Amino acid sequence: MKVLIDETTIERRVTEMAADIRALYGDTPFTLLVVLKGAFMFAADLARRIGAPHMRIEFIRLSSYRGTCSTGSVSVPAGELARYAGQDILIVEDIVDTGLTLEVFSKALTGAGARSVRICSFLEKSEVNKGRVKIDFLGFPIPDKFVVGYGLDCDEKHRDLPHVAIFDED
């Protein structure tokens, strides 16, 4: 596997993103809504750097991938969304590929009564997303390659890498 983004570069960018998020929300309470499982490492580092006493951290599991392929459908646990009514939500995602998952999820949150919904993504394949989903806080644009590391996996493997690497199936 070839390293795409090294650990030092990740640390620097996450710190910059946290400062931007703090500046946007100021003293306004908000919920960091972390999409499991891939975003857990990014979200943990980001939350520690944001360090806002008025920030809540919640987790949700969405699914649209199996192996290295998108299934083309998104499952959103609709019953859980009502608890976000009236809240400012910052969705934390590991990667925006086609944008389908976040498009469906952000509309569902808005429909459930969230006051605002913003998106923070560690990675984006902009040539695939093509503006389908607006990312408010972006870590890194990447090429249309399957990547692993820093929480991202291939069938539950390679999440533990401290960097992001282009996955080689060989």
Image (cartoon, rainbow, N blue to C red):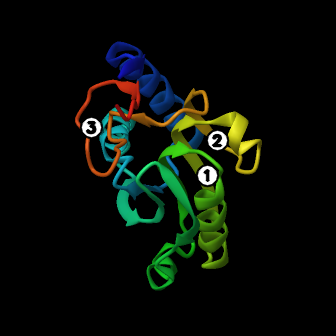
How far apart in space, not on screen, are marks 1 and 2 (Cα)?
Answer: 6 Å
Separation of disc 1 and disc 3 at Cα?
A: 28 Å
Q: Residue furthest right?
A: 131
Ranked by sequence position, the earlier of labels 3 and 2 is 2
Foreground disc of the pair 1, 3: 3
Task: Give the x, y percent position of residue 157.
Answer: 25, 44
Q: Is residue 114 visible?
A: no
Q: Quadrant of the C terminus?
A: top left
Identify the residue position indicated by label 3 in the image.
158
Residue bearing mark 1: 118
> Which residue is located at x 64 percent, y 59 percent?
100
Q: Residue at x 76, y 41 (%)?
A: 130
Q: Assign a secondary structure to mark 2.
A: loop
Amino acid carrying label 2: it is: Asp
Identify the residue under disc 2.
136
The image shows residue 40 at horizontal and vertical percentages of 32, 47
Q: Nearer the viewer, residue 145 or 125?
A: 145
Q: Amino acid at mark 3?
A: His
The three-letter amino acid code for the residue at tag 1 is Arg
Percent x, y of residue 153: 34, 44
| Front position among marks 3 and 2 | 3
Closer to the N terminus: mark 1 or mark 3? 1
Check contact, mark 1 vs mark 3: CB within 8 A: no
CB within 8 Å, label 1 to label 2: yes
Between the C-alphas of marks 3 and 2, the distance is: 27 Å
Q: From this viewpoint, which residue is outermost toward the bottom?
A: 79
**Farthest-out residue, left:** 160
Element at label 3: loop
